Image (spheres, rainbow, N blue to C red):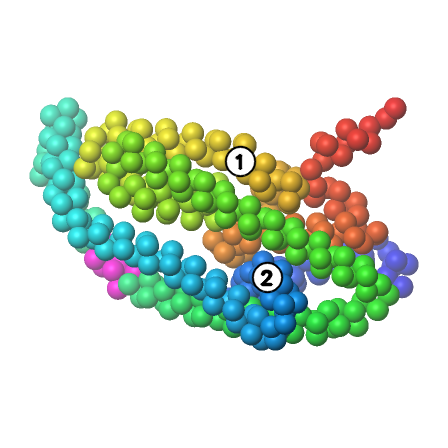
Amino acid sequence: MFKDSPYSVRLASVLISIYLVMLGLYYLQDLLILIAFALILAMVLLPLCRGLENKGFPRSVAISICLLFSVAIIVGLISLLTFQIIEFSNDWPMFIKKAEKWISGLQTFLSRNLNISRKKQMLEISNQTIGLLKNSGSILTATFSTIVHSLTILILIPIFMFFMLFYRSFFFTFLAMVFPTTEKDTLRGIMGKTGTVVQGYLIGLLFVMFTVACANSLGFWWIGVDYPIFFGITTGLLLLIPYIGIWIGASLPILLSLATLSPSHALAIIVWIAAVQFIEANFITPLVIGSKVSINPLVAMLALLGGEMLWGIPGLILALPFTAIIKVIFDHVPTLQPYGFILGEAPKRVKETEAP
C-alpha cells in the first residue's frame, strides 16, 4: 500500500517519521543515554560472561563477577586520580602565588606598553568578578544538579547492564517475534557482528587512551610540568570526546605552565599535544580502531555533529559506536545494503568495483 502511494505522500511520511524520531531522541535523552551506555558496555562484557558460564558458573554469578571486576578497575583508576588531585590541591596556594606574580607582570606590561593604567585594569577585573558572583548561585545549582545526575547514571548503568546480560535470550526471542520473516541465523549474525564491532572499537579505544596517556605523561615530565601523570591520564581519558577531548585535558597544564613557568613551557605543551594528536589520529587510531569500525570519515563527522546536537558530550561519545552498529544492520539487510555501502570506507570499495 505504501509503495503505491504518490511520491509526495511517501516523502512527507519519511520526513515526519524522521522528525518524530529526532523529537523522541531529544526529549527522552536522559533515559536513552542511560540505556545506550548500558547496552554498549554490556556488549563488551558479554564474551567474558559467556566464558564464565561455559565454565559452569550460573548466569547471575557470572554477570556479577564481570560487573565487580569492571567496577574494581574503575575504582582503582579513580583512586589514582583522587590521590593526584589531593596532592595537586595541597600545592594550589603555591600555584596561586605564582599566578599572582605572573598577573602582576602582565599588568605592568599592559600599563607600560599599551598605556592601560593599573586602576583601569583593576576596575575591569572588579566588574567581571561582581558579574561572576551575581551568577554564582545559578552556577552552583547547575553544578550540583549535574553531579547528582551523573552519580545517578553511574549507579543505574551497572543495574541496567545486569538485566541486559541476564535476559539476553529473552531479548533475542523478542527480536525474532518482531521480525518473523528474518531467519534466526541472520539475527544471530547481526547481533554477533554488532558485538564484535563494538568490542573491537571500545577495546581499541582503551588501548589508544592508554598510549596517549603514557605519551603525554612522558612529554609533560620532560617539559617540566608538575603532576605529569595526572595530566597525562586526564588527556587520555578525555579521548572519549573525539577530536577536542585531548585539548580540553591539556588546557589546565597549558594555563598552569603559562602562569607558573613561562610562555615557552606553555608553547612546548601545545606543540607536544599537537604532535601526539597528529600521530594518534593519522596512525594509531586508524590502525587499531579503523579496521574494526570501517566508517566513512565524512559520515563519522556528521555522526559526531548530530550526536553533540542531540545529546551533548554523551552524544559525542556514543556517536561512532552506534553509527557502526547501524552500518552492521544495513549490511545484513538486502534492501538497506546501499546505505551500508555509503556509511563505509568508500575509496577502497570504489577501487575494487571500478570498471573496466
* Residue at the image position 71 percent from the left and 31 percent from the top: 347
Q: Quadrant of the N terminus?
A: bottom right
Secondary element at image label 1: helix
**Viewer-nearest of discs 1 and 2:** 2
Is 149 left or right of 90, judged from the image as shown? right
> Which quadrant of the structure image shows residue 149?
bottom left
**Marks 1 and 2, Cα distance to the nearest angstrom?**
26 Å
The secondary structure type at the circle numbered 2 is helix
Residue 52 is one of the magenta-drawn residues: no
Q: Which residues are magenta?
A: 131-139
Closer to the camera in the image, 281 or 145? 281
Q: Position of residue 253 (x, y in %)?
A: 29, 40
User: Is 168 in front, or is 180?
Assistant: 168
Which residue is under mark 2? 48
**Which secondary structure type mostly characterizes the magenta part of the structure?**
helix
Q: Amino acid at mark 2?
A: Leu
Does any portion of residue 232 appear in the rendered image? yes
